[in-house]
Image (cartoon, coloured by chain):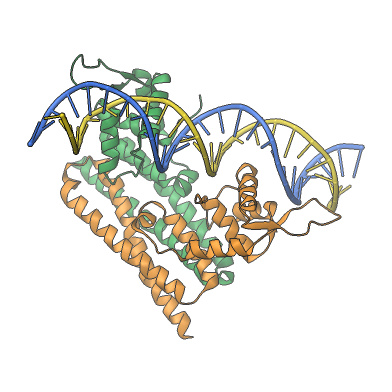
Chain colours: A orange, B green, C yellow, D blue
Amino acid sequence: MTPDSTLAYALLGLLHGAPQAGYDLRKTFASTPLAHFSDSPGAIYPALRRLARRRWVAAVAAPRSGRRRKVFAPTDLGRRAFAQWLGQAPTRDDVVRAWDVLMLRLAFLGAVGGPRLTVFLRGVESELRAYLGELEAYRAGHAAKMPLGARLAFDSGVEGYRAQARWVARALDRTRRERRK
Amino acid sequence: MTPDSTLAYALLGLLHGAPQAGYDLRKTFASTPLAHFSDSPGAIYPALRRLARRRWVAAVAAPRSGRRRKVFAPTDLGRRAFAQWLGQAPTRDDVVRAWDVLMLRLAFLGAVGGPRLTVFLRGVESELRAYLGELEAYRAGHAAKMPLGARLAFDSGVEGYRAQARWVARALDRTRRERRK
DNA sequence: GCCTTCATGTAATGAGTTACATGATTCT
DNA sequence: AGAATCATGTAACTCATTACATGAAGGC
C-alpha cells in the first residue's frame, strides 16, 4: 500500500481527537500555528476521500435536517494505521528533511502519553546528534571556501539543529518530571 | 508570468556561478548539504526544459565530439529574473513557511555581496521578531490547554525561531565587520 | 569484451494550488 | 430581502517522485 501524504495523517490524527467534518478540520488548520497545513478545500476534501476509500475513516450518521455535513471518524483499521505511523522510530531522514512531520507525530503522541513519548524523544535526540556531527565535519572541510552568503545560510541550519538538540534535552527532562508526578 | 518552482531558481542560481549541464547540477545537489533538493533526473531535466522554454537559460555550444552534454547558461532575461527574485523583501510568509527558500536566496546573495545582504538580513530580522511575538501571544493564550506532546512540538518551533533570531543578529554583525575590512 | 560511470530522458502516479461553482442556512 | 457564513465540491495546472530506458565513453 502506498504511503499516504502527511496531510492525510494530520487529518486522521485530528479525527482521533473528535469526529469532525472537513470544514471543521479546515478551520483548525486556519487557526492554529501548530502545523502549517493548507486549509484549502482542494487539498482537504480529496484527502478525506482518499482516507475513506482506504477505509481508514468512515462517515458517521449525517444529520437528517439542518446543514449538509459529512462527519468522519477513524475506523479500527485507521486507528491501527495511525498507531503504526506514530510508532515508527525517527530516522536520520526524518530529522534532516521532515522535522515538521516529526513534530506532528510528537503532538499526537502527547495525547497518547506514557513511555512511548520518551522513546520517541530519545530517538530524535540520537539522530539529531549524529547529524550535527556530520554538519560539523562538513564545515571543517568546506567553510573556508564558501562565499559569505552560503556560509551564513549554512550556519543558520546548524544553529537551528543545535537549538533543537537543546530543546529535545529539555523535553526529555520535562517528560521525566511529568511521569514522576 | 507564473512564478517558477524553488528548484528552478536554485538551478538558475547555480548556472550563474558557472554554466553547467544537468548532470553537474544533480551532483551538486547530491553532495552539498546546503539545500536539500532532489537530485533525481525526473525533477531536474524537466525543470531545465521549463527554464529554457522561458528563455531564462540557453544551451551553449554542445561539444562536437566526446560525451553528449547540454551545458546551460543564464540569458540576460534569466539574469534579470534572478536578480528580481533575489531582491524581493522577505515577507512574514517567507519566514514562517519558507525558511529554506530564504536561506537559498541568502546563499546566492552572498556571492553578489555588498549592502543588499545587509538589507536582506534586516528584513529577515524584523519579520522574525514580529512572528516570535505572535507565537508568544499564542502560547500565553493556549499553552495551558495543550496536551504535553503538542506543547513540546510548539516549543520546538519557538526555539527554532529564537535560534534563528540570534543567528540573524550575529550574521548582521559579521557582515558589518566584513565590510569594514 | 565487459563493467562502470557519464548523461539525458520518459512514463505513471500522486498530490497540492488557485480559482471557481453551488447551494443551504442564519443573521440583520 | 440581502449579506455573510456554512459546507462541499470540481477543474486546470504545476510539480515532484519512483522507476525504467537508452546509449555512449572510458577503464581494465
From the viewer's side, name the closer residue of B62 and B157.
B62
Rendered view: D25 above or below D10: above
Could you tell me which residue is drawn at 64 percent across and 57 percent down?
A: A57
Could you tell me which residue is drawn at 44 percent across and 34 percent down?
A: B5
Residue D22 in picture, x, y percent from top left: 32, 25
Residue D20 in picture, x, y percent from top left: 38, 35
Q: Is residue B9 visible?
A: no
Residue C12 in picture, x, y percent from top left: 50, 34
Residue D4 in picture, x, y percent from top left: 76, 45
Rendered view: B5 above or below B147: above
Q: Quadrant of residue A126?
A: bottom left
From the viewer's side, name the closer residue of A63 and B11.
A63
Q: Is residue B18 visible?
A: yes
Could you tell me which residue is drawn at 32 percent across and 31 percent down?
A: B13
**Outermost residue toward the bottom in this view:** A181
Q: Is residue A53 left or right of residue A111?
A: right
Q: Is residue B65 left or right of residue A179?
A: left
From the viewer's side, name the closer residue of A45 and B74.
A45
Q: Is residue D13 left or right of residue A94?
A: right
Rendered view: A14 above or below A41: below
